[in-house]
Amino acid sequence: MNKKIIPICFALLLGSVTSCTSFKPYKMEIRQGNYVTLEMRQKIRVGMSRQQVTSVLGSPLVSDVFHANRWDYIYRFEEKRNLAEQQRFTLYFDGEFVKRIEDSLAESNAQTAPAKQVRTED
């Protein structure tokens, strides 16, 4: 009876070894930064205070001491190690109030349709 069990065990072992060769590691989705939705972008206006901006967008991910009057909201999404989405929303302040807005989504839409990509105080 032992002679019948050995070939069966060998076949099972061989089958499990060959299945390991087709093993593919899991690749995580990586989201980094501040995701700013279209609705959030539309609420931001020139002349808003820093506190008003923070209540809509939250704090920027990185505070730059060299550019204290600029807030960058940067978002990056990688799916299976490939860049799937990237956006940048930058606010420039004059003292406590928004003076200028730069939006990467408006810039990318400008190629397909006329859109205002930079809003400034007149």
Image (cartoon, grey):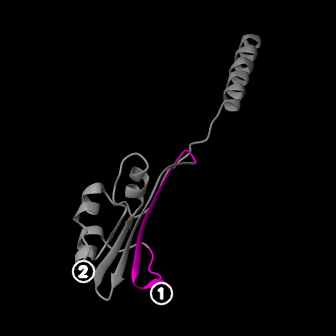
Q: Which residues are magenta?
A: 62-81
Q: Is residue 11 above or below residue 121?
A: above
Residue 78, given in percent of the width and then of the height, sits at 51, 51
What residue do we see at 58% from left, 48% from top? 81
In the image: residue 22, left or right of residue 51:
right
Placement of 82 over or under 68, stated as above or below = above
Counting from the top left corner in percent of width and height, residue 89 is at 39, 65
Where does residue 79 sit, x and y in percent of width and height?
A: 51, 46
Q: Quadrant of the N terminus?
A: top right
Q: Secondary structure at mark 1?
A: helix
Q: Give the residue displayed 35% in from the left and 51% down from the top.
A: 114
**Residue that label 1 marks:** 65
**Residue 95 pos. (x, y %):** 32, 89
In the rendered view of the protein, which quadrant contains the C terminus? bottom left
Q: Residues within 10 Å of mark 1 (few under 14, many from 20)?
A: few
Amino acid carrying mark 1 in the image: Val
- What residue sits right under mark 2 in the picture? 51
The type of residue carrying mark 2 is: Gln
Q: Residue at image x 34%, y 55%?
A: 115
Residue 66 is covered by the magenta coloring: yes
The image shows residue 96, relative to residue 42, as above or below, that is below
User: Quick check: 15 left or right of 56?
Assistant: right
Residue 49 figure quarter:
bottom left
Residue drawn 74% across the image and 20% down it:
10
